[in-house]
Image (cartoon, grey):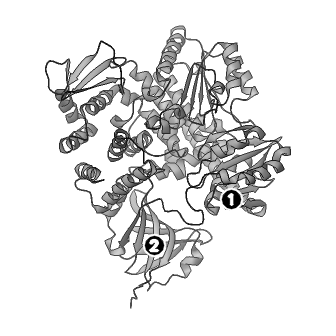
Amino acid sequence: MTEFSKWYEAAYPKAGKIAKSIFENYCQRINEEHPAISPDFLKKVILTYLFPYRIFQESAFALPGMYEAVVVLRQVFDKCRRYKDGKICLFADSDADGILAASLFYIFLRDIISLKEDQIVFLTPGFDDKFGIGDNFVKKILEINPELLITFDCGSTDAKALEIIKETTKAKIIVVDHHHLPQDKRDFPPVDVFLNSKLCHKESAASYLSSSALAYKLIRGYFYSYSSFFGKVYEVWENDQKVYVKDGLIIENPPSEVISVSWDNSKTQIVLKNIWEKESRHQAELFDIRQFGEKMPTAISMADKFLLLQEALQKKTEVMTRFSVVMAAIGVVADLVPLWLDNRIMVAQALRLLSQLKEGIPLGLRELLRRLDILHPYIQQDDFAFSLCPTINSADRMGNPQLAFRCLIEKDPLKAAKLAYELFELNQKRKTVFKQALALLHEGTIIENERLVIAYHREIHRGISGLLASRLAQEYRRPAMVLVHDGDSLRGSVRSYRHEDIFTFIARFKDRFLQFGGHSQAAGFSLAYSEKDNFMKEIYEQVEHLVTQGPIDREENLALQIYIMDHELDHGLWSELFLFSPYGQKNPKPELVLTNTLPFQVHFMGEEKNHAKITFSAFPELDALWFFAADEAKELKEYLSYEWYGEPLWDYFNGKLKYVLKIKKVKLKESSITHE
C-alpha cells in the first residue's frame, strides 16, 4: 500500500487528502477481493486506475480466437467488396448491450468497410420471440444465405441452431458473447470463431468485457492486423533482462527471427528513447505517463513503454474507431459489468470525447443525447446509467428493439431526430407501465425468505420483468425473481442484490426450462406453465446454494464514506470526489456524509410535493435531493444538526453547473448543535 501511495502522489501531486483516501480505499478493496492476485496483474489494475487512458487498454489479441476472427473478417470483406455482392448477417440480443454491439458493427461495415446497406442484414428477437436463435430465425438466416453470420450478446448456448445454419449455408460464423458458457465443451457452438470473454484468463481485462466491448475489440483487432506491428516478435531489452512481445502481448518461446528493442543501445534495431520522447511531446496521455515514469521508474518497465508506444502509434485507428468506443462504453454501463480495467478505460474515453463534443459521434446517437439533454461538457456515467441506457433499453422492453437500432445507425439528420423523439416517447411510456406494474406486483403474489424473493402476477407487462426484479432486489435487499405470462409459457427474470452468482444458481434447474441464459448478475428463463408449482417448491428447497456475501439483514457499505462539515463544502470538494470516476461495480462511488452546523432550508418538489430539496446557507450551489421523503423532511428541525448521507452528483442545466447530493438517509447528530 505504501508503494501505491507513492504512485498516487506521483500521478496527482496537487490532489488532496479526500482523493487520496478514495484511491487507498480502492487498493485495499482490490487486495481483499483478489487475495491471490499476481503482482503483474495488480500493477496493471492500479496503473489503469490512475490512468484510464486508451493506450493502457489490453491488446485485442488477448481474446482467444481473435486471430481466427481477423482472418475470417479479412477474407469475407475482401470477397464482399470485390464482387459487390454477398451478405453479412448481424444477429443480436435485443437488450441495450446487444443492440449497441450490432449498431457499432453495422456502422463499421457501412462507413469504414464501405459495404452497401443491402449487403448488411440485422436481425434481433421481437416481443414474441424466445431467447436466442429460435427456429423462425434459423429459417430467416437460411433464406438470407449470408457469407458471414455474427451473433452479438448471444449464441453461446445456440449450438443446434448454429450447426443447422453452418451445414446448410456454409457461411462463416463468429459468436461474440459474454454470457456463461455451456458446462460441457462438447456443447460449445460449432462455429468458425467463438469470442466469449468467459474463455479468457481471470487475470485479463478481456474476461470482464461486455458484448458491445467485444465488438469494439473485434474492430480494433481487424485494424491492428493491417499495422506494421502485426505478427512480428520484438525482443525488448531492459538491463540484462529481455521480454518478448507479439501483437501487444508478452509471449514465451519466441521464434528465431525477432526484432531487438532497447532504450538507448544503438546496436539494437529499434532505439526506444527517441521515439518515446518524441511521441510524449505530442500526445497528452503519453506525456502524463512519461512524467509519472520519471518519478516512479520501477512502475513503468521497458516492455510497458514499448506496449504503450504501440498503442499510441495507432493514431489512424484511434480516429476511425472513435465512434465505436463511445457506443461500446454505453453498452458497458448498460450491462452492469465491472467498471475497471478496459471497461473503465472505454467509459472514461467515451466521456472525454462526448464532453469535448468531438465530431465522429454517430448522428443517431448524437440526436438521442440531445433529446435527453445530456450532450454537454459535464456528461458523466450517471447520465448513461439513468438516462441514456434506460431509453435504449425501452425499445426492447416495449417490444420494438428495431427502433433503438434504427435510431443509432441513422445518417439522415431529420430521420435521426424523428427516431430519437420516438425512442424518447417510448421510454416515457415505459416509465408509466413500470409504475403501474409495480403497484400490481405488490397486490399480487410475493413470496420471500431470507435469501430470495419471488413475485408473480398474471397482468404484468412481460417486457419489464427484469426492471421489476431489479427494483424488488433493492426493496427487499436480496436477489429477486419475477414471473410473468409470456404466450404459451412463463418468463422469469432474476437479478442479484449484491454480487450473488444468480446464473450458477438458476442453472441448477436447467432441465425444467424451455430456454435460459444470462450472466452472474442477471439471468432469464422460460418455463412451461405446468412446471410452475414444482419449480417454486424446488427453488426454495435449493435456495441455500445461492451464494451471498455476508449477512442479508445488515446494510452493506461497499462505498467509502467521507465525512465533512457543511462549512467545508466548496467547488474543489466535488473535483476530488470525481477524480477517479467513472464509478461502478468494483469501483463504487464514495458516499458523502455531511454534517450541518449552519442553517438549512427545506423545499418540496414534484407534482405531489413528495420530494424534498434541502439547501445549505454555507454552500448555496449545492442541492440536496431527498426523493419520496416529504414526510420525513417535514420532521426536520432547522435549528438541529443532522448527518446527511448521500451520493454526490453533477447537474448541468441551461448552461449552469450545479452540485447535487442525492440523499439516501438522514440521522440526527447525537451532539446536535442548537442555533439561536
Closer to the camera: disc 2 or disc 1? 2
Expressed as whole percent of the image width and height from the top left, the position of residue 279 reads 22, 31
Residue at the outermost front position: 36
Residue on which disc 2 sits: 644
Tell me: 570 left or right of 146.
Answer: left
Residue at the outermost bottom position: 676
- When the figure is inspected, residue 402 is found, relative to residue 145, above or below; the finding is below
3D distance between C-alphas at marks 2 and 1: 28 Å
Q: Residue at x 51, y 39 (%)?
A: 365
Q: Is residue 653 visible?
A: no
427 or 418, nearer to the observer: 427
Expressed as whole percent of the image width and height from the top left, the position of residue 330 reads 50, 42
Residue at the outermost top position: 83
Expressed as whole percent of the image width and height from the top left, the position of residue 649 reads 44, 60
Work out whether mark 2 precedes mark 1 in sequence or the reverse, and give the earlier one. 1
Q: Residue at x 65, y 38 (%)?
A: 401
Where disc 2 sits, the SS reads strand
Expressed as whole percent of the image width and height from the top left, the position of residue 402 reads 64, 35
Residue on which disc 1 sits: 435
- When the figure is inspected, residue 646 is found, relative to residue 132, above or below; the finding is below
Q: Specify the amino acid type for callout 1.
A: Lys
Image quadrant where residue 490 sits: top right
Count of numbered badges drawn on the protein: 2
117 or 450, nearer to the observer: 450
Q: Residues within 10 Å of mark 2 (few under 14, many from 20)?
A: many
Dots 2, 1 in contact, CB < 8 A:
no
Q: Specify the amino acid type for callout 2.
A: Trp
